């Protein structure tokens, strides 16, 4: 299975289990953000 197929099937599984809106909310929890947290916090 290609990485694209895995992503598509994984997202479809989330949509099937949670619905589209909550699947997107779940994925957004893992956003890496940007910047340097260590540098910016001081």
Image (cartoon, rainbow, N blue to C red):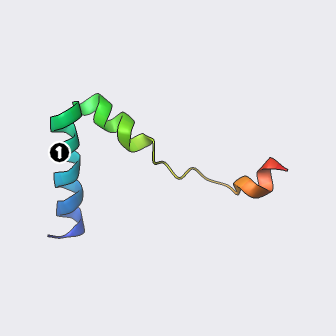
**Which quadrant would the N terminus be assigned to in this image?**
bottom left
Relative image position of residue 2 (x, y in whole percent): 18, 70
**How many labels, in total?**
1
Q: Seen in the image, is 40 located left or right of residue 5?
A: right
Tell me the SS state at disc 1: helix
Relative image position of residue 15 (x, y in whole percent): 20, 37
Where, by quadrant of the figure, is residue 39 drawn?
bottom right
Number of other residues with Cα within 10 Å of mark 1, as a class: few under 14, some 14 to 19, many 20 or more? some
Q: Residue furthest right?
A: 42
Where, by quadrant of the figure, is residue 19 drawn?
top left
- The residue positioned 23% from the left and 32% from the top of the image is 18
Q: Seen in the image, is 37 located left or right of residue 13?
A: right
Relative image position of residue 25 (x, y in whole percent): 38, 34
Q: Residue furthest front?
A: 17
Between 35 and 17, the residue placed more toward the observer is 17
**Location of mark 1 (residue):** 12
User: Compared to 33, does 25 lie above or below?
Assistant: above
Relative image position of residue 37 (x, y in whole percent): 71, 53
Q: Seen in the image, is 35 located left or right of residue 4?
A: right
- The residue positioned 85% from the left and 50% from the top of the image is 42
């Amino acid at each position: 299975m290609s990485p694209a197929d895995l992503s598509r099937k994984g997202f479809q599984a989330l949509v099937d289990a949670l619905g589209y809106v909550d699947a997107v909310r779940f994925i957004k929890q893992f956003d890496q953000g940007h910047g340097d947290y260590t540098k910016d916090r001081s």
